[in-house]
Image (spheres, rainbow, N blue to C red):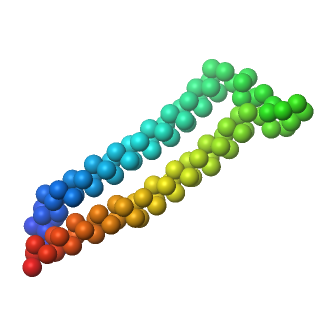
Amino acid sequence: MSSVMYERMRTNPKFQELVARRGRFAWTLALVVLIMFYGFVMVVAFNPASLGQPVGQGSMWTFGVIVELFMFVFFWILTAIYVRRANSEFDALTQEIVKEAWKEKK
């Protein structure tokens, strides 16, 4: 593609919408991950005994293990959510932008 076509795509209002929506969504997910991860690290640093408590009487499972397993699964779910939205909504908008740029070229 030529630089003229790239400029057409960049000036397209749909492109600005795509950048804004994708950016908001990515930053929201990043913020959720950072808060959860660093919150866990802070608990480990300042109150590690709370994570070492067994879940139930005589249980080998501790709250720390359960929380970490939850975080691991939750982060995978967030990744799947991002991929699904990127493959549907964001890719569809990208295709519209490219089609419009090609129409203007012809």
Residue 64 lies in what quarter of the image? Answer: top right
The single residue placed furthest to the right in the displayed view is 58
- Pinpoint residue 63: horizontal percent, then vertical percent: 73, 33
Left or right? Give the position of 98 relative to 64. Answer: left
Is residue 100 rendered to the left or right of residue 40? left
Q: How many marks?
A: 0
Query: Left of 85 or right of it: where is 45?
Result: right
Residue 28 pos. (x, y %): 41, 42
In the image, residue 61 above or below residue 72 = above
Q: Quadrant of the C terminus?
A: bottom left
* Camera-side residue of 42 and 98: 98
Residue 54 picture location, percent across and down: 81, 31
Q: Residue furthest bottom?
A: 106
Which residue appears at 21% of the width and 53% of the height? 16
Q: Quadrant of residue 101?
A: bottom left
Quadrant of the snapshot with the N terminus = bottom left
- Position of residue 57 relative to residue 92, above or below, is above
Residue 73, above or below 40: below
Q: Residue, x 66% and y 21% (percent of image)?
A: 47
Residue at the spot 62% in from the left edge and 46% down from the top edge:
72
Q: Position of residue 56 (x, y in %)?
A: 84, 32
Quadrant of the rendered structure where residue 24 is? top left
Q: Is residue 3 visible?
A: no
For residue 40, say whether it is visible: yes
State left or right for residue 13 relative to residue 41.
left
